[in-house]
Amino acid sequence: MAETDWTTLFMQIFWIIFFVMILTGANQKIQMKLWSIDIRNKLRVIKRYIDEDRHKIENYLRNLGVETPQFLIHRITNYFIIDPVDKEPTDIIKRMDHLIRIEERGIRNIVKEYVPNIGNYERSLLESSLSILGTLNQLYKTVQHYLLVSEKENNWILLMQLELIMPQVMRIAEMYHEALDPFLTGKPIGDSIGPYIAYRLIESGEIISRKVIEETSITEVRLDNRRVYVIKAEGPGSNVGKPGKVLAQLIEELKGNVDLVITVDAALKLEGEKLGEIAEGVGAAIGDPGPEKIAIERATAKYNIPLHAVVVKIGLEDAINTMKKEIYEACERAYEYIRKLLVELTKPNATIIVAGIGNTIGVSG
Amino acid sequence: MTLDLETIVLLITISAVTLLIMTLMELRKQPKKPEYETIELLECIQCRYRLERPFEPGDFISMYKGKCPKCGSPLRIKAIYNVEKSFKHP
């Protein structure tokens, strides 16, 4: 019996399997199965986040006296807003603003219906926490949808795209999951940079007057021999207020006699940029869908008022998570920077408006 | 050159083990996510004495909390922030 040539045999088997797989597309099937398993594992992680967060919110609601929190959670987490028609852009801002206000009122009324005796502070925390859970839920459902569709239709391109964006999806899911703690306990977050700097300006000046319009406070202070109106969302609950509308209204009240408007906000840093870097520029530093930003731009343009912006750079995961010490230190630097700007850009006795944009959670005033 | 079955099996095993070690090394290289604790910075409104305490739910910046250990005046929360848990503070 001749001796078996194992090398040749092995190579023959290898090439046969290789060509059969290439010709029948079996290699693609294996690849799809591997992607599918990986996405399912990641979906399980997101599901775990949702279950944990739901459990925490249920406990929070039970402490507030709600016996069956599941109904409220289900109703709010599935609440949606339909974007206004953009093919006809005329008055789109007005329509968008209308829808945003209806949504805010709608969620508030639902929460009040289930938790009638809740205070404003607890209500704001609850609304934001439910919103976080809703976002996570939507993320889970969207990923699951594309996974099932790609499997059903054997669409390997769709599955591959999903697999490639999964690290980013997981980063966002983790970020929202970790954001629940500050929103349930009322800790300042990265987005609280603007309101915190506004608070520091109020704290440093001599308070002349204060009023609250649409959950947004306007505090008139005497600072560095100048009249400074500080606008921020009313704290310390989770609230972003209506800084754009209020600023526009204030400019109208002052008949346009404003020498400078400064908006302060957190801005997303690019990869490689330093956390807490301060940057100065021109324009309205505000990240709303449109109505607030356009109100600032229109009001300042109408009276030809210089519109400046100061931003503190933070990462995506810092925006809705508890403020880090590095960000707090950057806030202090930005506060000093703005004090210098006020003196540098205006003369004594000038009228200035400073708007601290962002969520004021954990920051009063 | 001809190889016997044992050599082929040995080569495949060595390759598999090398791949496994490389994967494990890659996994170990990934940085561990730091753990944070939330601290509140309290400042005396009179003598400006400062101290740090762990955050308690419901506390907020500008809230008065406790008395100054130096002069007895009220302490006010100046800041609330996360710090990385270190070996200094187990």
Image: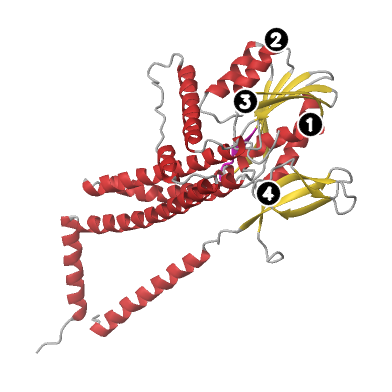
Span shown in magenta: A265-271
Residue pointed to by mark 2 = A255
The amino acid on which the numbered mark 3 sits, given as a three-letter code, is Pro
What is the chain letter for disc 3? A
Give the side of residue A343 with respect to residue A295, left or right: right
Q: Assess disc 1: are there few (<14), some (14-19) or many (≥20) residues with their C-alpha within 10 Å of its C-alpha.
A: some
The amino acid on which the numbered mark 4 sits, given as a three-letter code, is Tyr
The amino acid on which the numbered mark 2 sits, given as a three-letter code, is Lys
Label 4: element kind = strand
Q: Kindly identify the residue that appears in the image at 11 percent across and 87 percent down.
A: A2
Of the pair A340 and A117, the residue shown nearer to us: A117
The numbered dot on residue A243 is 3
For the residues labelled 3 and 2, the Cα–Cα distance comes to 18 Å
For the residues labelled 2 and 1, the Cα–Cα distance comes to 25 Å
Residue A278: x percent and y percent? 68, 38
For the residues labelled 4 and 3, the Cα–Cα distance comes to 25 Å
The numbered dot on residue A339 is 1
Q: Assess disc 2: are there few (<14), some (14-19) or many (≥20) residues with their C-alpha within 10 Å of its C-alpha.
A: few
What is the chain letter for disc 2? A
Q: Is residue A248 above or below residue A177?
A: above
- First in sequence, mark 1 or 3: give its number: 3
